[in-house]
Amino acid sequence: MTLEIWLAFVATSAVLLVIPGPTILLVVSYALGQGWRTALPTAIGVALGDFTAMTLCLLGLGALLAASATIFTVLKWIGAAYLVWLGIKLWRAGGALDAKPRTDAASSLKMLGHAWIVTALNPKGLVFFVAFLPQFIDLKLPFLPQVGVLAATFLVMAFTNVVAYALVASRARTMARSARTLGIINKAGGSLLIGAGIATVTLRASQS
């Protein structure tokens, strides 16, 4: 894997992680209700959930690549189209984030488990990983070393993102729930996702 591909993965992952979804909604709800102490357990739970989802995804991708490189390539094209569609959807989403403070006295273990379940069992997350990860896998190179680097990078970034969201939500609660702020994030992220999908298709076409 080249440094350029890895940096592209980091940049795209950063955009995807910062966009609010079910996991971030849960994290913000806990932080709004119980403060900064929720950051570590929810971050660990999200990282474990992403690890679970990515493992299931990579097992399937590995089997698919072993069966047919052509089908794997077709999946990469479909994935690029999915990124563009997701970007358009995010652009039109506005700034809605119905994060209600969770005031129930949840233990750290309960928060960890809740974050893990929400992240791991989110079907949209599995679809996302199937569409997203193949974009950065070079069929000419060994599969496992590449996905190992990508998975480790994503998990570290996911952990850091959740900690940041929890701390911001606990300290700056108005900003964390601001429709304007979330609208800007969604539009910026949507634009970058559309660009990433188009860039992937353009690059692949120039290499064919």
Image (spheres, helix red, strand yellow):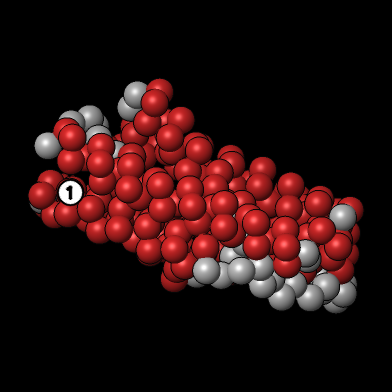
Q: Which residue appears at 23% of the width and 53% of the height?
A: 77
Could you tell me if residue 41 is visible in this image? Answer: no
Task: State the image quarter where residue 199 is shown.
Answer: top left
Which quarter of the rendered picture does the C terminus lie within? top left
Decide if residue 119 is in sight here: yes
User: How many discs mark residues in the rendered view?
Assistant: 1
Is 118 placed left or right of 111 in the picture?
left
**Residue 32: where, in percent of width, then height?**
84, 65
Which sits in the foreground, 173 or 70? 173
Residue 144, position as x, y percentages in the image: 31, 37
Q: Is residue 163 left or right of residue 12?
A: right
Which image quadrant for residue 30? bottom right
Left or right: where does residue 87 sit relative to residue 81?
right
Q: Secondary structure at mark 1?
A: helix
Determine whether 173 is above or below 135 in the image: below
Relative to 70, 86 lies left or right? right
Say if 72 sits above or below 143 in the image.
Answer: below
- Residue at image mark 1: 73
x, y (%) of residue 68? 10, 51
In the current view of this chain or complex, which residue is farthest to the top?
3
Q: Quadrant of the N terminus?
A: top left
73 w.r.t. 107: above or below:
above
Please name the residue shown 73% across and 53% down the image: 165
Task: Classify 10 Å Cα crowding around label 1: few (below 14), some (14-19), many (20 and above).
Answer: some
Residue at (21% x, 40% y) in the render = 204
**Which amino acid, by three-letter code, is at mark 1?**
Thr
Q: Residue at the location (37% across, 31% down)?
A: 5
